[in-house]
Image (cartoon, helix red, strand yellow):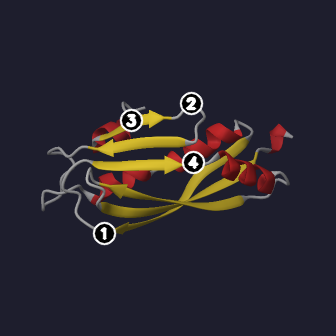
Amino acid sequence: MSLYPPLLGAGIRVVEFSDDWTVCRTELRLNRLNRNQQGTAFGGSIGSMSDAFFALLLWNQLGKGYYVWDTKAEIDYLSPGTGTVHGRFEVPREVAEEVRAAAASGDKVLRWFETDLTLDDGTVVAHVRRQVYVRRRSDSR
């Protein structure tokens, strides 16, 4: 997945997907293409770093009988990304089952997920919230 052009172009590497699709880890290594005018991580790359990972984890846990999309994002930039930025995205099994139960009727479900993007020393570069839309596919009943 690290070779997916939008990630590759932003300098983002997928480090890990857990076997059970509950956790994904990514990193953004600074290079000349993803630095801003101050020499720190470009905000667009930080945004891309969090795009779709919660949805991807949830979709793989729910299965192909569901539509799963990112619908909203909120990013609070808290400190400059002066080195490698790390992301850890988690969708516990219990949360996936809650979403599955809520979507069983065919209604849409909107669920917020949150994480911090950090430097090697734990400094929080950005706090990210992503809203994920889930609906059971009508052809999967």
Asked if labels 2 and 3 touch by Cβ distance under 8 angstroms, the answer is: no
Closer to the chain start, of discs 4 and 1, is: 4
Q: Which residue is mark 2?
A: 19
- How much space separates mark 4 and mark 2, taking CA atoms? 16 Å
Closer to the chain start, of discs 4 and 3, is: 3
Q: Amino acid at mark 2?
A: Asp
Decide if residue 137 is in sight here.
yes
Q: Position of residue 125 (x, y in %)?
A: 30, 61
Q: Amino acid at mark 4?
A: Ala
Q: Which residue is mark 3?
A: 15
Asked if labels 1 and 2 touch by Cβ distance under 8 angstroms, the answer is: no
Q: Position of residue 137 (x, y in %)?
A: 77, 44
Quarter placement of the C terminus: top right
Closer to the chain start, of discs 3 and 1, is: 3
Q: Position of residue 95 (x, y in %)?
A: 67, 52
Q: Is residue 6 left or right of residue 112?
A: left
Closer to the chain start, of discs 4 and 2, is: 2
What label sits on residue 78 in the rendered view?
Answer: 1
- How much space separates mark 3 and mark 2, taking CA atoms? 13 Å
Badge 1 local density, few (<14 within 10 Å), some, or many (20+)? few
Q: Is residue 66 left or right of residue 5?
A: right
Q: Amino acid at mark 3?
A: Val
Asked if labels 3 and 4 touch by Cβ distance under 8 angstroms, the answer is: no
Q: Which residue is mark 4?
A: 55
